[in-house]
């Protein structure tokens, strides 16, 4: 294969992935006006359902426009030898491979963030605002972006620097050391994410003593789930949408409730949601997902080690000096079809786990309370009740509301 033919293969992959995603979005949009199944007839009042359709359509149209613009910018960057230009800038500053790689990806990341900011701003302050979801202030929006960039530079830059260094001193064997590094980082994030990362963006406070906390503690004791603490996060600072999540494992496990969840659901429904989260822990889903993530990372890094030293990757992007950072860009695009397949498999596993967690909540707490909570959350989030089956199969990490209710009442 010549550098020119590889260049056009990269372009073809980018365009094909875009077309497949757009086709799925179009198919999904055609189901927006489908008749609501009988099991879901009580989720939306008629006017509210029309509002949900309008919300879905607004997001669909926004995504088509923004993704098309992103595609055009990316193709222009390729055809105008943008990667070669950035590489030259990085090499004019340093001749150290690690520093060059950090500068290269730093320019790419900051440039990408600047270009995507108008679209993100529009989505939050126009679409989310119009439909009553947005609670983010302009000040919070930009502070969040600054914090995210700083975190990416420190955490992402640190990991990238070590991986490039491993490559420089070990060659193709770098993937083993990189895999070990990423594994340690992944485990640490799973254990301490709520302690280290969440406080940077949100305020967490222990759930106040009272009837809800007593009921949660009573349920936890009943199922033998030793809970270190229950926290409430100020999700209403940014959105009216509600959520709850389980994090950590071992002595560091904790459950976090969004303040919007406490506002939207009654006591029985909140405990039913928590029972679902406890089900994930009891069924070992947290550990299995962690092991799958580590295994996929190892597979990806191994594939990367087979191609990264091939100068053809750099030459295809118009760069004559082979380097890890340029090879990583080309490999990332070449690997994207495999990534789509592994993502599909992970979604299938995730949907199976969601059914199992629902079943656990059904058997240990209250079936109808969980159903009512799912209906309320769908209504309050203006969720799509009639998605296209292909969209569900490829992109959904959770079963649809209808599928979950049917399974719970089976």
Image (tube, grey):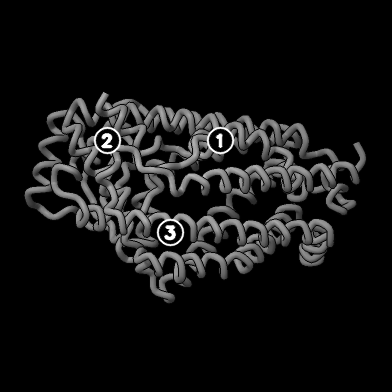
Res. 388 mark? none
Decide which of 118, 406 is in the foreground and name it. 406
Distance, label 2 to label 3, CA atoms, is 28 Å
In the image, what residue occupies the spot 73% across and 60% down? 72
Residue 369 placement: quadrant = top left
Disc 3 + disc 1, Cβ < 8 Å = no
The residues tagged by marks 1 and 2 sit, at their Cα atoms, a distance apart of 23 Å
Residue 167 picture location, percent across and down = 72, 41
Q: Residue 42: horizontal and vertical position, in percent?
A: 25, 45
Residue drawn at (22%, 54%), measured in percent from left and top? 264
Task: Characterize the local packing of mark 3: few (<14), some (14-19) or many (20 or more) Cα atoms within 10 angstroms.
Answer: some
Vertical relation: 27 (above or below) 88? above
Q: Nearer the viewer, residue 40 or 193?
A: 40
**Which label sits on residue 276?**
2
Mark 3 = which residue? 55
Instruction: Please identify the quarter of the rendering in which residue 6 is found.
Output: top right
Residue 168 appears in view: no
Q: Earlier in the sequence, mark 2 or mark 3?
A: 3
The residue sitting at the top extreme is 410
Which one is in front in this view, the residue at disc 2 or the one at disc 3?
Answer: 3
Give the labeled residue for mark 1: 343
Q: Check disc 2 and report its element: helix, strand or loop.
A: helix
- Determine whether, in the image, residue 320 is placed left or right of residue 174: right
Task: Determine whether label 1 and label 2 are within 8 Å by CB.
Answer: no
Is residue 347 at all visible to an observer of this figure?
yes
Give the mark nearest the N terminus, 1 or 2: 2
Relative depth, front residue between 350 and 404: 404
The quadrant in which the N terminus is found is top right
Whole-percent x and y of residue 331? 73, 41
């Amino acid at each position: 294969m010549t550098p020119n033919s590889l260049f056009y293969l990269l372009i073809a992959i980018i365009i094909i992935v875009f077309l497949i995603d757009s086709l799925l979005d179009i198919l999904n949009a055609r189901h927006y006006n489908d008749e609501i199944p009988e099991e879901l007839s009580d989720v939306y009042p008629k006017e509210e359902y029309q509002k949900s359709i309008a919300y879905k359509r607004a997001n669909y149209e926004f995504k088509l426009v923004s993704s098309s613009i992103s595609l055009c910018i990316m193709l222009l960057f390729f055809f105008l030898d943008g990667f070669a230009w950035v590489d030259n800038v990085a090499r004019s500053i340093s001749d150290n491979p690690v520093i060059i790689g950090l500068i290269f990806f730093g320019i790419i990341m900051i440039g990408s963030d600047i270009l995507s900011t108008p679209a993100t701003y529009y989505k939050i302050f126009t679409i989310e605002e119009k439909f009553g979801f947005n609670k983010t202030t302009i000040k919070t929006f930009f502070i969040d972006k600054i914090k995210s960039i700083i975190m990416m530079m420190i955490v992402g830059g640190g990991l990238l620097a070590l991986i490039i260094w491993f490559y420089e001193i070990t060659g193709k064997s770098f993937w083993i050391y990189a895999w070990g590094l990423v594994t340690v980082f992944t485990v640490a994030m799973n254990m301490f994410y709520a302690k280290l990362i969440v406080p940077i963006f949100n305020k967490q406070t222990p759930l106040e003593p009272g009837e809800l906390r007593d009921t949660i503690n009573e349920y936890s004791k009943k199922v033998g789930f030793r809970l270190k603490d229950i926290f409430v996060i100020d999700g209403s600072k940014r959105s009216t949408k509600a959520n709850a999540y389980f994090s950590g494992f071992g002595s560091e496990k904790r459950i976090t409730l969004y303040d919007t969840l406490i506002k939207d659901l009654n006591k029985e429904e909140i405990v039913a949601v928590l029972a679902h989260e406890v089900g994930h822990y009891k069924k070992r889903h947290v550990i299995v997902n962690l092991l799958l993530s580590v295994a996929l990372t190892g597979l990806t890094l191994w594939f990367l080690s087979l191609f990264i030293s091939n100068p053809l990757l750099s030459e295809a992007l118009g760069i004559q000096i082979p380097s890890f950072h340029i090879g990583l860009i080309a490999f990332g695009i070449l690997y994207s079809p495999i990534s789509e397949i592994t993502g599909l498999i992970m979604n299938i596993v995730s949907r199976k786990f969601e059914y199992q967690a629902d079943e656990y909540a059904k058997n240990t707490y209250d079936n109808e309370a969980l159903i009512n909570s799912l209906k309320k959350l769908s209504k309050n989030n203006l969720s799509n009740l009639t998605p296209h089956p292909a969209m569900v199969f490829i992109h959904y990490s959770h079963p649809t509301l209808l599928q979950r209710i049917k399974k719970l009442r089976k």
